[in-house]
Image (cartoon, coloured by chain):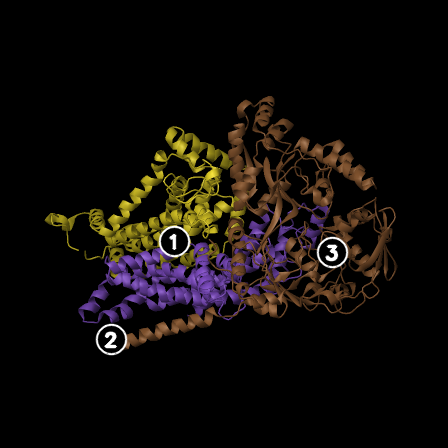
């Protein structure tokens, strides 16, 4: 080849590359295109297992159900933790035992079929039917005879405390006074399912029924299912039959399942989604420094703790358990490792002020001297003679780093040597279930805004106890609280119970969670919620942001 | 040839059956349960679920039901995604994985073979050194490092392609590039080794002595024998690529089969795991058979036996 | 390259192994690789003795710090010295990489040679077994292994036995403790070795098939050499080239697989570490703390590069047809 030819080819290549670069790099941002059409793109963690609200159990499912369905009460737009009228326009109760709900006469399913009180009765019967195997059936146990029906000891559903007095009046009779019922009813296990659709696709108790497919599924929420491409995206569209459709401003929501938080964060920076589901821990500091406008951090009702197997010989001694807790520097872990604004646990129930629960004991502290004294008292001065045990964790970098820090704190403060044993999630769950561990990492998120959601599980023999701990006085206090109608007295009882729990330490609370995520400035109307409840009907996309060049551009890639 | 194919087909059925039985037994031996949840699942609910999915039946009965279902191409539902058939998941995800795998293989060959040939033809020269170093780099950068790097460079900095998702007709580029670059390292190393081996053989020397030009020697005579190790590597690799790469699919959020392959095993979505494993076994059989045929065609000494 | 000038004239009848060694050491590139590997082993084995830190020493006041005079490779999120952790991690990775690859190579070579040489139905059956194992649900298998860990009496016994044997030399026992040696380590070798030999077996078989009808094998047969003699004397030297190349490709796979298995609970347990685990962790912070990925990554890559250099040199040196 002559040098001129070479030069020409080279120039053509370079020119082509420049053209390619200009064309490709000026592609419109996906979020901007979406914003113009009032379409919201949301990162939604992992793919949903099902859209059947009676079969589902997970958090990502919850986020979609909030769009597709609505219970008698709905999250309030201004404060999603407070109950607001949903499918029921109003309700009344005199004693917190007998509740009457007045449904909207114009309430409809997303196919236009009227929504009646009978739908609710049928739905509650379905979730409580033993053959369905609904894992969240216990959420409805406050209803009189619901537990008996679900356990199969009662066959006649008419005995259960749910009655449709007429098409638009539903009466609930509870086992005891429950001032927090409304908060509980925002959980999706209380939502209605469409009888007329489910019966078309087979048996009501068939978990694998195809009624949940796009095209089949009918809901009563502000949005209706449009399309569900497995591990690709789930799209919902505004439901014209929704009773409050007038206030719904978003036309379409696309839920994108992005299992990896680092991928999700890149997708966010690339303008693929308006909001992430979470944010990788190492990047939180960078966002706090350079992109404060998109970083959001909200307290949520979740607590990180270690379970102690109280049936193991050396852990039977309450002094040892207390020493283990006193030797942990929670502030150190939060400020040095987590660094996202988590709060060190003072008790088990997170953020008691958000639950109007001032009775919550605030007893957890870091006191190595006291810890050493207790260990010596228990017969292990300076940790001598204390048998080696393992901290069981499920495989995750954050859990491992915390466990490594704890390992070091216990070695330094107590002189005991522990190992760390990581297991894959499934094996870890089974080990925990079989109590085949000494100390293991755990977390618990509240289902409803009441301390009981954190305290009832420690009753003797509760399936979620898994520590072998049992205390008659504790059980008694919890049972008393279930019969107490007065809210303050009830919380006093729960406070006493929690004090016993923290005095006996079958668990070591570490910290209260915050939900950290990134959200673009054009997404407005989203209100923090300790229960992570979402009132989508109050959300909207601010078009004016599109005209401000500064925020139209994608976030700079130089996050580091 | 026909006899060979028929015999291979019959052997294949035995292999598939064996793979099925092994997978099934391992699932049953597993300490985990598909019906565990983060929260305790009440005992009666667990019983209901077990009987719904037939886990309470004797093993042999369960096995027979599964064999019947898969053999009639009527696979059961996913255990962990109620209301979703195994066939449905595979038929949606498999084409996506294929769309990534084919370009990835082509990229791997297009980069790897020339790189390996350069190294082999000029052994122990600077060309060999840099080619070997480049190939080694491709091998030892794991996909969970290379993927994010590629996403950052071509996605976030240059903004040529989307960093994640499967919306755009160009969304295959970055994941395929990631896979292709990694496998190109293997291809280059195997090409170099094979060529070095062959170029020393008598018939090459004869060809050279007869005055054949170097490119003719390499392409006509050497390359087709040199690729035996490479071929044997490519068979299972192609099968593996077609069933998807978990890491790459996660990094680029691709709705392919790879993530199901891993997650169904870990989460005990037993039916889905069996379905994907069987698909993988079929692909392994097909590709290893192709390798055997090509091997025989390139090297008459090997021949096909049935 | 010419013969070394001092080589005596009778070099033409020197033993094949001596020839190989001479060729290997006269190849600048494989010598470079060998020297580097030696340095690396020294770094990982002797290095910790010179480090002022232990791999578990935490300092939360100096966490995720960039490389500095006191921490040459920076610190991790718990303030541990990355260089010390890289040394200890290297021990695990090198041990696993070489031992497991050795197991895989041994099984693969023998299996492939027998299959190729015997041929016929045996060959078909043996190759179908390989096909089955390709599709073997490895993850389920590993999960089952993790569940028997620490409970199965055989494993507990094996662990105790190994530690007992090691305690003869206290330094060795100390090293094993530093490695985080336990029963799951033993299983790790078995698990990796068991899956990584498949392609090796197919490569070797292909090679044997193409060789076994060549003149020199037929000639050996005609004067009555037995199968094992043909295998060892005539075929093994001829398949060793592809075996070495393929083995050098298996090593990185094995090393990274170790990390994956550690995450599933098989292999090392924290706070012990390996390059694979360090690289995995580093990858999660590569845009905020690149040194966490960079240093283990560079050591990993350089190890493999020198291994490949040595492997190429070995292949050339052992090639019976080589004119040099």
Image position of A467 with respect to C242: above or below: above
* Residue corresponding to mark 1: B140
Image position of A153 with respect to B93: above or below: above
Q: Which of B126 and B148 lies nearest the eye of the viewer? A: B148
Structural distance between the alpha carbons of marks 2 and 1: 39 Å
Image position of A372 with respect to B87: above or below: above
Image-quadrant location for residue A544:
bottom right
Residue at left offset 58%, top offset 67%: A546
Q: Which of C264 and C101 lies nearest the eye of the viewer? A: C264
Residue at left offset 71%, top offset 32%: A500
- Mark 2 chain: A
Query: Chain C appears what colour?
Result: yellow
Q: Which of A177 and A27 lies nearest the eye of the viewer? A: A27
Q: Nearer the viewer, mark 2 or mark 1?
A: 2
Q: Residues within 10 Å of mark 3 (few under 14, many from 20)?
A: some
- Mark 3 chain: A
Q: In the drawing, does residue A10 fall left or right of residue A67? A: left
* Residue corresponding to mark 3: A76
Image position of C4 with respect to A43: above or below: above
Q: Earlier in the sequence, mark 2 or mark 3?
A: 2
């Amino acid at each position: 080849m002559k040098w001129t030819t070479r030069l020409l080819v080279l120039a053509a290549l370079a020119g082509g590359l420049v053209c390619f670069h200009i064309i490709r790099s000026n592609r419109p941002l996906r979020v901007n295109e979406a914003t113009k059409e009032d379409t919201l793109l949301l990162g939604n963690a992992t793919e949903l297992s099902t859209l059947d609200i009676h079969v589902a159990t997970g958090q990502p499912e919850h986020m979609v159900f909030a769009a597709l369905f609505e219970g008698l009460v709905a999250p309030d737009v201004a404060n999603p933790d407070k109950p607001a009228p949903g499918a029921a326009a109003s309700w009344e109760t005199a004693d917190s035992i007998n509740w009457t709900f007045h449904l909207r006469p114009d309430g409809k399913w997303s196919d236009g079929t009227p929504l009646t009180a009978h739908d609710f009765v049928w739905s509650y019967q379905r979730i409580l039917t033993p053959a369905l195997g609904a894992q969240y059936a216990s959420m409805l146990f406050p209803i009189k005879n619901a537990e008996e029906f679900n356990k199969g000891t009662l066959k006649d559903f008419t005995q259960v405390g749910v009655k449709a007095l007429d098409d638009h009046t539903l009466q609930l009779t509870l086992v005891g006074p429950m001032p927090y019922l409304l908060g509980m009813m925002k959980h999706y296990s209380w939502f209605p399912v469409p009888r007329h659709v489910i019966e078309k696709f087979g048996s009501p108790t068939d978990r694998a029924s195809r009624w949940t497919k796009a095209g089949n599924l009918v809901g009563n929420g502000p949005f209706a299912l449009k399309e569900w491409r497995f591990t690709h995206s789930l799209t919902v569209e505004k439901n014209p039959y929704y009773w409050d459709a007038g206030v719904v401003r978003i036309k379409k929501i696309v839920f994108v399942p992005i299992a990896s938080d680092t991928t999700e964060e890149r997708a966010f920076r690339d303008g693929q989604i308006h909001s992430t589901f979470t944010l990788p821990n190492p990047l939180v500091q960078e966002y706090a420094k350079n992109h404060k406008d998109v970083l959001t951090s909200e307290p949520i009702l979740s607590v990180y703790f270690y379970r102690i197997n109280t049936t193991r010989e050396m852990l039977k001694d309450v002094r040892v358990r207390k020493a283990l807790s006193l030797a942990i520097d929670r502030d150190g872990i939060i400020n040095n490792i987590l660094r996202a604004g988590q709060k060190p646990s003072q008790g088990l129930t997170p953020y008691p002020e958000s639950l109007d629960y001032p009775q919550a004991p605030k007893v957890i502290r870091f006191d190595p001297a006291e810890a050493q004294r207790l260990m010596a008292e228990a017969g292990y001065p300076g940790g001598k003679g204390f048998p080696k045990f393992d901290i069981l964790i499920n495989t995750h970098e954050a859990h491992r780093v915390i466990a490594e820090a704890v390992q070091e704190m216990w070695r330094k403060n107590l002189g005991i040597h522990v190992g760390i044993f990581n297991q894959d999630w499934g094996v870890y769950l089974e080990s925990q279930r079989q109590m085949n561990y000494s100390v293991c990492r755990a977390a618990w998120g509240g289902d409803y805004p009441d301390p009981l959601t954190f305290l009832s599980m420690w009753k003797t023999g509760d399936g979620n106890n898994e520590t072998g701990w049992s205390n008659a006085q504790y059980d008694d206090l919890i049972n008393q609280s279930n019969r107490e109608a007065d809210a303050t007295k009830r919380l006093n009882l729960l406070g006493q119970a929690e004090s016993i729990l923290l005095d006996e330490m079958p668990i070591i609370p570490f910290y209260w969670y915050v939900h950290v995520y990134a959200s673009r400035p054009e997404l407005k109307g989203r209100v923090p919620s300790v229960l992570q409840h979402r009132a989508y009907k109050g959300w909207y996309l601010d078009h004016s942001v599109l005209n401000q060049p500064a925020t139209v551009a994608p976030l700079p890639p130089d996050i580091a | 040839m026909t006899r060979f194919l028929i015999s291979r087909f019959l052997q294949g059925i035995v292999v598939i059956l064996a793979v099925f039985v092994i997978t099934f037994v391992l699932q049953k031996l597993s300490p985990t349960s598909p019906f565990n949840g983060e929260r305790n699942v009440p005992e009666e609910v667990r019983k209901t679920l077990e009987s719904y999915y037939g886990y309470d039946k004797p093993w042999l009965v369960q096995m027979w039901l599964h064999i019947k279902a898969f053999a009639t191409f009527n696979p059961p539902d996913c255990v962990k995604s109620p209301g979703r058939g195994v066939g449905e998941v595979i038929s949606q995800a498999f084409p996506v994985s294929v769309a990534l795998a084919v370009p990835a293989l082509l990229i791997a060959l297009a980069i790897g073979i020339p790189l390996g040939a350069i190294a082999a033809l000029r052994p122990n020269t600077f060309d060999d050194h840099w080619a070997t170093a480049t190939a080694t780099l491709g091998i030892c950068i794991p996909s969970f490092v290379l993927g994010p790097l590629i996403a950052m460079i071509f996605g976030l900095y240059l903004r040529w392609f989307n960093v994640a998702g499967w919306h755009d007709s160009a969304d295959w580029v970055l994941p395929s590039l990631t896979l292709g670059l990694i496998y190109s390292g293997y291809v280059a190393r195997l090409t170099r080794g094979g060529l070095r081996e062959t170029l020393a053989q008598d018939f090459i020397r004869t060809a050279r002595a007869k005055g054949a030009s170097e490119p003719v020697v390499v392409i006509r005579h050497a390359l087709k024998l040199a690729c035996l190790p490479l071929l044997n590597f490519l068979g299972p690799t192609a099968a593996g690529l077609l069933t998807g790469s978990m890491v790459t699919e996660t990094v680029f959020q691709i709705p392919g089969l790879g993530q199901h392959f891993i997650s169904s095993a870990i989460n005990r979505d037993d039916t889905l795991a069996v379905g994907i494993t069987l698909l993988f076994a079929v692909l392994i059989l097909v590709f290893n058979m192709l390798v055997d045929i090509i091997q025989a065609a390139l090297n008459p000494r090997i021949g096909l036996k049935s | 390259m010419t013969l070394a000038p001092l080589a005596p004239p009778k070099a033409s009848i020197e033993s094949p192994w001596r020839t190989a060694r001479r060729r290997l050491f006269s190849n600048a590139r494989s010598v470079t690789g060998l020297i580097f590997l030696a340095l690396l082993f020294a770094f990982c084995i002797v290095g910790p003795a010179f480090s002022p830190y232990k791999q578990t020493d935490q300092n939360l006041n100096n966490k995720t710090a960039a490389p500095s005079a006191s921490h040459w490779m920076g610190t991790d999120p718990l303030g541990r010295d990355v260089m010390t952790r890289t040394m200890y991690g290297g021990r695990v990775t090198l041990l696993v990489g070489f031992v497991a690859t050795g197991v895989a190579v041994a099984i693969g070579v023998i299996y492939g040679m027998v299959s190729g040489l015997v041929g016929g139905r045996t060959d078909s059956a043996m190759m179908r077994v390989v096909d089955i194992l390709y599709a073997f649900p490895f993850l389920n298998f590993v999960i089952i292994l993790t569940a028997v860990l620490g409970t199965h009496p055989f494993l507990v016994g094996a662990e105790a036995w190994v530690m007992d044997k090691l305690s003869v030399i206290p330094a060795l026992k100390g090293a094993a403790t530093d490695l985080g040696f336990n029963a799951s380590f033993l299983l790790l070798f078995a698990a990796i070795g068991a899956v990584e030999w498949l392609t090796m077996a197919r490569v070797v078989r292909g090679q044997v098939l193409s060789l076994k009808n060549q003149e020199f094998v037929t000639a050996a047969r005609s004067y009555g050499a037995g199968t094992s003699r043909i295998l060892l004397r005539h075929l093994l030297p001829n398949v060793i080239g592809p075996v070495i190349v393929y083995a050098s490709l298996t090593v990185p796979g094995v090393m990274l697989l170790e990390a994956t298995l550690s995450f599933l609970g098989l292999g090392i347990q924290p706070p012990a570490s390996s390059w694979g685990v360090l690289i995995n962790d580093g990858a999660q912070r590569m845009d905020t703390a690149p040194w966490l990925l960079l240093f283990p990554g560079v050591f990993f890559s350089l190890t493999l590069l020198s291994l490949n250099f040595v492997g190429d040199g070995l292949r050339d040196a052992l090639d019976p047809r080589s004119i040099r």
